[in-house]
Image (spheres, helix red, strand yellow):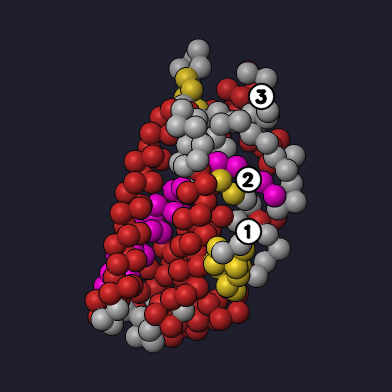
């Protein structure tokens, strides 16, 4: 099994936590389920934190070659 | 399900989602971590996050009149728990590591038996496909494997 820091996991997690978190807050309020509302709020907060890290790490791993081409590196150990 | 939602086939979309929750997601426990696994030969971690977006999309289109999101809330939480676990694990990396905070996991379900070792980021995302060509040129000039070669390793 690959166990890699994989950028798409973070990207999809950010979007999923943000969008479903907002929905769960609505669902929890309608159903009078404070646990669901709280979970939704927590997910939105976590999505914001992850997005901050995501943007920082994308910038930290960026390489620019001699030709000015920008890429995100990958290579074997 | 996305197609059904976008064409207004809400009854069909409801059936697809309910079927997914009932028969394709199972709750498992691994040393105290309760999470939802997909009944497939391997996990594809980005799609765990994608599922959450689709659940939200279903609610935004239909209002979820059948209450599927609450009915299957435990399985939704199982997906959230799994992603949180990956995120927490990634925060144990050294803060100077470019991968700090970035969840790690299987990127492609069909490659679940492959072992690929990378040192920094693995950018194989479909979302970034347009960047592959310039990356391959750079990788070749640096003597590194291209994304294509890596994917078939």
* Distance between mark 3 and mark 2 Cα atoms: 20 Å
* Local secondary structure at mark 2: loop
Q: Chain of mark 2?
A: A
Which label belongs to residue A33? none
Q: Is residue B7 left or right of residue B141?
A: left
- What residue lies at 70% left-to-right and 53% top-to-bottom? B112
Is residue B81 depicted above or below A76 in this figure? Answer: below
- Which one is in front, A47 or A8? A47
* Local secondary structure at mark 1: loop
* Distance between mark 1 and mark 3 Cα atoms: 27 Å
Q: Quadrant of residue A13?
A: bottom left
Q: Position of residue A35 (x, y in %)?
A: 32, 73
**Numbered disc in front, either 1 or 3:** 1
Is residue B103 depicted above or below B70 in this figure? Answer: above
Q: Chain of mark 1?
A: B
Q: Position of residue B144 (x, y in %)?
A: 66, 24
Which label belongs to residue B43? 1
Q: Earlier in the sequence, mark 1 or mark 3?
A: 1
| Residue that lies at the very extreme toward the top in this rendered image | A66
Which label belongs to residue A3? 2
Residue to which mark 3 is pinned: B144
Residue A4 highlighted magenta (yes or no): yes
Q: Is residue B24 left or right of residue B151?
A: left
* Local secondary structure at mark 3: loop
Magenta-tinted stretch: A1-26
**Numbered disc in front, either 3 or 2:** 2
């Amino acid at each position: 099994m690959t166990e890699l820091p994989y950028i798409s996991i973070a990207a999809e997690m950010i979007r999923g936590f943000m969008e479903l978190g907002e929905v769960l807050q609505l669902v929890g309020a309608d159903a009078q389920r404070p646990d669901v509302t709280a979970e939704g709020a927590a997910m939105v907060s976590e999505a914001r934190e992850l997005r901050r890290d995501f943007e920082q790490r994308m910038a930290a791993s960026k390489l620019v070659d001699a030709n000015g081409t920008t890429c995100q590196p990958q290579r074997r150990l | 399900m996305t197609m059904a939602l976008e064409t207004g086939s809400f009854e069909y979309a409801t059936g697809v989602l309910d079927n997914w929750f009932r028969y394709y997601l199972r709750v498992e426990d691994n040393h105290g971590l309760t999470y939802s696994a997909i009944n497939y030969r391997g996990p594809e971690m980005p799609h765990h996050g994608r599922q959450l977006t689709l659940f939200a999309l279903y609610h935004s289109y239909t209002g979820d009149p059948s209450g599927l999101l609450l009915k299957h809330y435990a399985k939704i939480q199982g997906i959230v728990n799994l992603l949180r676990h990956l995120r927490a694990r990634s925060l144990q990396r050294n803060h100077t590591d470019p991968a700090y905070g970035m969840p790690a996991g299987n990127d492609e379900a069909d490659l679940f038996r492959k072992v690929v070792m990378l040192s920094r980021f693995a950018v194989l995302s479909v979302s970034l496909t347009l960047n592959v060509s310039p990356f391959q040129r750079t990788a070749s000039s640096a003597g590194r494997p291209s994304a294509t070669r890596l994917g078939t390793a």
